[in-house]
Image (tube, rainbow, N blue to C red):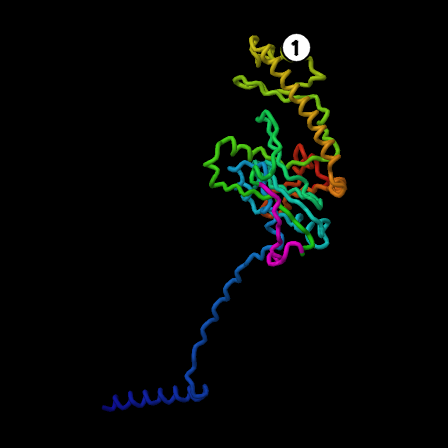
Amino acid sequence: MARAKGRKRAAAAGGDSQAEAAAANGGRPKRTKTPPKPKPEPEYVHEPRNLEDLWLSAFPIGTEWENIDKIKEFNWNFENLEKALEEGGKLYGKTVYVFGSTEPQLLNVGGESKIVLIPVVVVVDCPFPPSDKIGINSVQRENEEIVPMRVMKMAWVPYVPLEDRLTRIDSLKTKIFTLGCTQRRSALKHLKEERVKKFDYCMPYYMPLSPPEDEDDTVVNIMYPLEPPIVCDFDWEMDDMEDFIDEKVKDEVLPEDEKEKFKDFIKERVRERKRELKQAKEARKKAIDDMDPKLKEAFENIRFYKFYPVKTDDTPDVSQVKARYINRYYRHVHEVL
């Protein structure tokens, strides 16, 4: 029994000491501190720039349908284009027409050489649309076609910057129109192959007031239907017809029994080319004579700008492959950026 009393006294003593500790802590038992939870890393939310999607809004005319998705292979940046159109930029406050295109180039990507489809943007500084037509042309096609934009489901479409999408278009300082195309890719399978291929050969058409460099050109492109076809150029002023044909026979690209047919083919192509040049001169003269004076003045002061993507950490460097050439109609730009 004595031992049991001793245990009771020890328990009582322990209770007294806990009570004293609680009293020293303001009457509350002492709590152990838990370490603070680590703060979660703030999520980065990309705020789109006001004109960030402008370059994507411009249809990349002349790009094969199966290659259009390749444009998005890299996160291309066109801040140079955006700055030119924003307040303080050289195109701010103007009316511009914008179309896209692509240029395949061999670039250094991650230390390796790779063919990259580079998107480019052409900006036309003009108060009036530069044209409402499309040229359809390629080496594979025998004849050039100039058709209204609507035939290829294209048109100039107003572009409204992100911050102004609840604003009336006519109140914007800078008026931007992009070349749009309403042809749905999903519907291509229902079209004839010839119709689909036409989109691959489309170019924005423009008729400058000054004659093109090739208006007095004496060279015709030859594609003679053999297997394989004979593809060459013939200059009707510089080349002697007989010598030209004999050379093809000597090089074993033209059979001896095809000489007369080949000669007739070249003569017909020369006649066609001369007829095209004559018609083009007459059409240019009539168009200029009939042109509204304000439109003529605008075309006299028209300027073309070509924008390439700016260099970023996650895109290849395109600075060494920039070119002033646009196409056979627009020819060269006034400035490359």
Q: Is residue 68 magenta?
A: no
Q: Is residue 161 magenta?
A: yes
Q: Which residues are magenta?
A: 154-170
Residue 37: horizontal and vertical position, in percent?
47, 68
Q: Quadrant of the N terminus?
A: bottom left
Residue denoted by label 1: 242
Q: Residue 122: which quarter of the image?
A: top right
Residue extending furthest toward the front = 290
Q: Is residue 246 above or below residue 149?
A: above
**Residue sitting at 73 percent across and 36 percent down?**
290
Report the number of discs: 1
Q: Does the image show residue 35?
A: yes
Please, what secondary structure does the residue beneath circle 1 have?
A: helix
Q: Is residue 12 above or below residue 198?
A: below
Few, some or many C-alpha atoms within 10 Å of disc 1 (few <14, some 14-19, many ≥20)? Answer: few
Residue 124: horizontal and vertical position, in percent?
69, 43
Q: Quadrant of the C terminus?
A: top right
- Given the image, on which type of amino acid does mark 1 rest? Glu
**Residue sitting at 50 percent across and 42 percent down?**
184
